Image: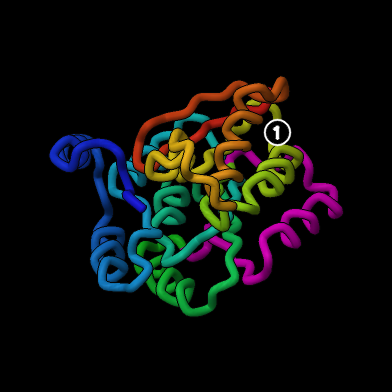
Amino acid sequence: MSRSLVPEAISAYAASLVATETEAQRRLRAETARLPMAMMQIGVDQGAFLTFLVGAIGAKQAIEIGTFTGYSAIAIARALPKNGQLLCCDVSEEWTAIARRYWKEAGLERRIELKLAPALETLETLICKGREGDFDFAFIDADKTGYDAYYEACLKLLRPGGVIALDNMLWGGAVIDPQANDKDTLAIRALNAKIANDARVDASLVTIGDGVMLARKK
């Protein structure tokens, strides 16, 4: 699965122009690139986009679903105020052990809480605890067939004006391929259509990386 539909030279230009990484991010990206599942890591330009977006909406409380080795978490957490908090939901002790090392190196470990459990269970627990409306931002980048449920739960947890960003919403171009009918593609295609027609949000599909759907809660 391609990380971006934009030509490589254009992606490199965009990244070099405005994407500023911390030293911890650069080293984490290099270490992750050597792993078998390296394509699950977002690109430099997308990391810069998340940092910009989180800062632009003044987010203080954020949720991430699907953390992998922690690059996107750094991108989000570095834009939060010192008293801000990012809750990361993942199920892999192996991958998040790498993340923890780099969060500490980046000086962000106190801003990031990692919950190793099925994400939907964590989100439903937050809802049951009365946390609806407490969060400003959510980034969803996990199992694609679970996206719809994550979207619905995050929509409850976000305040009005809060933003949900969903990764891989162009799915390497498979969303427009009539021959692509696997479960992941069908799930993404259906959710794109749902969000586009969801009266609860304002939406924009951004063609950065593998496609980022933005949904702002009304």
Task: Look at the image and tell me in which quarter the C terminus lies.
Answer: top right
Expressed as whole percent of the image width and height from the top left, the position of residue 135 reads 66, 42
Count of numbered circles in the view = 1
Q: Is residue 136 above or below residue 74?
A: above
Question: Is residue 160 or residue 12 the one in the foreground?
Answer: 12
| Residue 113 on the magenta segment | yes
Residue 54 at least partly seen: no
Q: Is residue 7 above or below residue 123?
A: above
Residue located at (59% from left, 52% from top): 183
Residue beneath disc 1: 159
Horizontal side, residue 93 vs residue 191: left or right? left
Residue 43 horizontal/vertical position (percent): 31, 49
The image quarter containing residue 113 is bottom right
Pick the residue in front: 107 or 155.
Answer: 155
Q: Is residue 29 visible?
A: yes
Q: Judging from the image, what secondary structure is the residue with disc 1 in?
A: strand
Q: Quadrant of residue 164?
A: top right
Q: Is residue 44 left or right of residue 129?
A: left
Tell me where the magenta segment starts and ends, as one range. Answer: 109-137
Disc 1 marks which amino acid? Arg
The location of residue 138, given as percent across then percent down, is 58, 44
**Does the magenta portion include 91?**
no
Q: Percent position (x, y) of residue 216?
A: 60, 27
Residue located 61% across and 45% down the image: 187
Name the residue furthest front: 179
For the point 72% across and 60% down, which residue is it?
Answer: 122
